[in-house]
Structure formats: C-alpha cells, structure tokens
Image: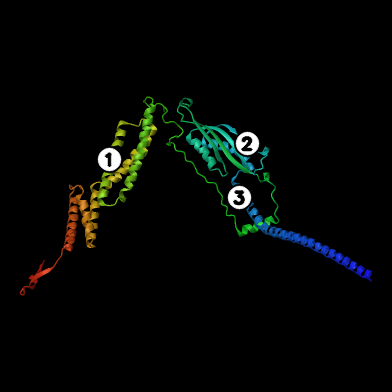
Amino acid sequence: MLNVIRNAKKKAWIIIGVSTALVFSCAGVVWMDHGTIKEEDEKIAGLEASITKAEGRISKIRGHEDRVLRGRLVVKEYAKILPSDKDIHEFVKRITEFSVASGVEISELNDSDARNRGRRQSKDPFQKINYKLKLRGDLGATLDFINRFESYERFVKVGQLKIASETANSRDAGEGIRHNVDLELETYVYEPGRALTAVEIANSEKRTFEILEKEPLNVDLAMDSYVYQPRSDRRDPFADPRRSIGTGAGEGPIVDAEVEAQIAKLEELVVRFETLKRDLAAEDEVEGFVARMEYAKRLSQSFIDFKNEVEELRKVKFFSKADLLDRFDEEIAEPFLVLLAEREATDGEGLKRQELMAQLEHYEHAFSEGRFSDVVDGADAILSAKTDLDDPEIHEILEGIQRVAGRARARIEFAQMSLAITGYVILENRPTGSVVIIN
C-alpha cells in the first residue's frame, strides 16, 4: 500500500513538471510570436508610409509633365532669336555685306569657332560661337557697322571692342581720322540634341495642345533695334583733339595748345548757354513782384555779358579751325541771338509795366475783399524798391498802387480806433446839418 502511494506521488510530480515545462514552452513560443508580429506590424506601417509618399509623387507626375511640356515650348520660342545652322553658315557673308554698307575695311576675319563647333564635346545645348575681326574705318563707319549687328534680327553681342586711332603720319592726305578696331562678336546656337535624351511623355502632342488652350504662352519676344544716323559734325571721342590738325587756307599750322584752348572755350560756352536757357525758363516761376524784378535784372545782365563775349569772339576770330567755328555759329551764336531777340521783345520797361499793372489789379481786388494788410505790405515792398520812374506810365501805375495802399492803411487805422459818441447837436430847422460828437 505504501508503495502505491509513493508511486502515485511520483507520477503526480512528473505530471506537474511536464505540465510546467509545457506551459513555459508555450509561453516562450507566444512571446516569440508576439515579437515577430510586432516587427511585421512595423514593416507594414513603413510600407504603408512609403506607398502614401509614392502615391503623392505619382499624383504630381502629371503636373510635372505639363510644366515640362510648357517649358519646352518656352525654350523653343526663346531660341527663335538665336541663329539657325543656315544663319551660321551665311554669317560671314552677312558680315561682309555689313562692312560694305557701312564703309569699313575688314583686314582679318576669324570664324574658326563656327567651323569647329561640330567637334566640341560639350553637352550644353546652347553653344557659344565667337567671330574675331580686325577692321579699319572712321568713327561714323565703325559705329554704323556695329549698329547693323545691334539691329540684326538674330542675337549677336559685341563681346569685345578695342580701338586704336591712327597717327597723322599714317593717314593719306585729306583723309579723316581712321581707327584700327579689334572686334569680337558673340552669338549662340541652340542644339537640344547635345543635352540628355528628352524624357518621353505619353500623349505629349495632345496634352501640349490642351495646355496652350488653357493658358497661351504670351511670349512676344523681339529684338530691340536702333538705327544709327551718322553725323558729320560729331566730335570723334577716340581722337586726341590736341593733335596737329593740319594747315588751313592761307594759314600756318595750328598749334596744339591753341586748338585745345578753342575746344575748351567752346565747351564752356555750351554749358553757359544751357544754363542761360534754364534760368530764362525759370523766370516765370519766381514768386513776388520784387523778387521777379530782381531776378529779371540779374538775368538781363547775364544776357548782356554773354552777348558781349560772343561778339568779341567773332570780332577777334577766336575760332581758327573750321569745324570749331561752325559749331560756335550753329550751337552758340545763332541760337543765342534768336533767344536774345525773343527776350528783348518782352524785356525792359514793357515787362515792368505789365508786372506793375498786374500788381495794381491784384491790390484793388484784395482791397475789395477786405485784405488791407496784404495790400499795405505788398505795396510798401514795391514802392521801397528801386524802380525806374523816368517812364511816365510806370510812374502813373505806382501812384495808383500808392493810392490803394493809402486807402487800405486808413481802413486799418480806422478799425483800430476806439470810438464813442459823447454828444450830438440837432438842428431842427435843418436836420441834415445835425452833428454827432465822437470821442
């Protein structure tokens, strides 16, 4: 019996041990499965986030493609101002035409950059091409030649310009000043095939049409142009004015210092004449009669001084060089005499009479409105100024101003008086002769 009990207990402990081992084993398996599930959940969450981002990028693809299609159209429009292959091949011919039309002589033309452009390894779709020229011509011809590229329908830029004036000894007899010019022209050719292969976009033609229907390009690109008009009287800024100019008819060589002095005097007169015209235009803006009269007096003296100097320069034949004398007559003397005649037509006593009459009317109007102080102050300023009284009309107008001022002054003094009636005398037989005693 005792053995049976012992065996039963032993079996029970064995069962308990096995059960415990099974429980722990199951718990371990469950714990490991829980960790695996958590990892898988995290992977799933990461994949879902990636999918969301991918879907966002996918949703933007059409917009990006539309912008690419529109950008291609814009680039194509802007590239229209750039020379085509045909233009590049014929550009040397165009340069020759421009030189003949403007009058410059081309001594050297280097177009190797254009001829070798096909051998370049650059992947830039915009290929820069330079043309290097050496030419000879005077100021007008040189500027005319450059202007023809400025007005050319294709984009051409003057990348570099060097000018060296020839000496007097290197020029032919009777020939004007010519310049040796080093000129570098720069342009671009658009070659989209040099760039990376364009991305293919599905239904690109149809979608491009739809894009333009919704929003037209509105690209109105045109090259600015300017037509240069040569002027024979223009001073050459690249020539040294101090050089010996040569010999005039019946004259000896002009000394450099004399020419320099004549040019300096001419430029001084130009500045003074412009100042004189500005001062004349500002005369009407001066406020107040006295201020205008003083301004007119100073301006008249400036006209007199300038007139005397112009007449003196003509008298002594100061400008011995023909082109300087022509400039003096055309830019200074002749327009100044016209301006002087116009001023003298309204200057002097006539101008004073007009101003004074206007002031008299102004003071009479101010008196009627009761502005007595304005009348007195303005009239005192005029009457105290040094005004020419030899003119009887001016004298008469001043007397009128003085009378208006006297009346205004009396009204001011009367208004300032403290009045009180202290008595009266009534004449019964003659009421109109009755008297009131004041103060």
The answer to whether residue 248 shows anywhere in this view is: no
Task: Using the image, determine if residue 74 lies above or below residue 230.
Answer: below
Packing grade of label 1 (10 A; few <14, some 14-19, many >=20) is few
Q: CA distance from mark 3 to mark 1?
A: 63 Å
Q: Secondary structure at mark 2?
A: helix
Residue type at mark 1: give it. Answer: Ile
Q: Evaluate if marks 3 and 1 touch, with contact meaning CB atoms under 8 Å apart.
A: no
Packing grade of label 2 (10 A; few <14, some 14-19, many >=20) is some
Instruction: Tell me which label, 1 or 2, sits earlier in the chain.
Output: 2
Q: Residue at x 35, y 37 (%)?
A: 269
Instruction: Tell me which label, 3 or 2, sits earlier in the chain.
Output: 3
Badge 2 is on which residue?
113
Split into 4 quadrants, where in the image is the N terminus?
bottom right
Q: Which mark is residue 121?
A: none
Image-based side of 417 in relation to 110, left or right: left
Q: CA distance from mark 1 to mark 2?
A: 65 Å
Q: Secondary structure at mark 1?
A: helix
The answer to whether residue 332 shows anywhere in this view is: yes
Q: Quadrant of residue 115?
A: top right
Relative image position of residue 262 (x, y in whole percent): 36, 32
Say which of 21 and 278 sits in front. 21
Relative image position of residue 253 (x, y in whole percent): 39, 25
Q: CA distance from mark 3 to mark 2?
A: 25 Å
Badge 3 is on which residue?
77
Task: Using the image, determine if residue 5 lies above or below residue 358.
Answer: below
Relative image position of residue 436 (x, y in whole percent): 10, 69
Say which of 59 and 167 sits in front. 59
Residue type at mark 2: give it. Answer: Asp
Badge 1 is on which residue?
304
